Image (tube, rainbow, N blue to C red):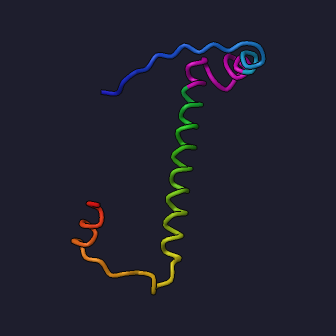
Amino acid sequence: MPRTTTMTVRVSGALSEFVATNVGEDGAYENVSEYIRDLIRRDKERAEHEAFDRLKAELNRAFAAPEDTYKPLTAADVIARNRT
């Protein structure tokens, strides 16, 4: 079962005014909770995208290596290498 987290966030001044313009009748969100959930979802997507980009870059570097730098390995070689 998914866990629910309750948060209390205080904003004032310019941040409070900014939130107010995005919530309610004239805003894009019905309420502050909806707005915060959307911000968290977007931040999660950004973090996942960055992690994927790092993985792609690492794989691109690995596959760009010249063929003569590759060494044949057996499964036993890989297991032994990872034990140390």
Residue 69 appears in which quarter of the rendering? bottom left
**Magenta stretch, residue numbers:** 19-36
Is 26 above or below relative to 56?
above
Residue extending farthest right: 14
Which residue is painted at 55% across and 49% down in the image? Answer: 49
Q: Please state the total of marks drawn on the protein image.
A: 0
Q: Residue 19 in the image: x percent, y percent?
A: 70, 20
46 on left or right of 19: left
Closer to the camera in the image, 45 or 24? 45
> Residue at image x 29%, y 66%?
81
Q: Quick one: 37 or 75, which is closer to the camera?
A: 75
Residue 74 image offset from top left, x and y in percent: 25, 76
Image vertical order of residue 61 relative to residue 66, above or below: above
Give the quarter of the image for residue 68.
bottom left
Q: Position of residue 30 (x, y in %)?
A: 61, 19
Q: Give yes or no for residue 34 being in the magenta stretch.
A: yes
Q: Is residue 47 above or below residue 36?
A: below
- Residue 8 belongs to the span the image colors magenta: no
Whether residue 41 sits left or right of residue 70 in the image: it is right
Query: Residue drawn at (51%, 51%), measured in percent from left and top?
Result: 51
Residue lying furthest left in this view? Answer: 76
| Picture quarter with the N terminus | top left
Quarter holding the C terminus is bottom left
At x 55%, y 56%, the residue is: 53
Q: What percent of the width, then of the height, locates residue 37?
A: 54, 27
Could you say which quadrant of the image residue 13 lies in?
top right
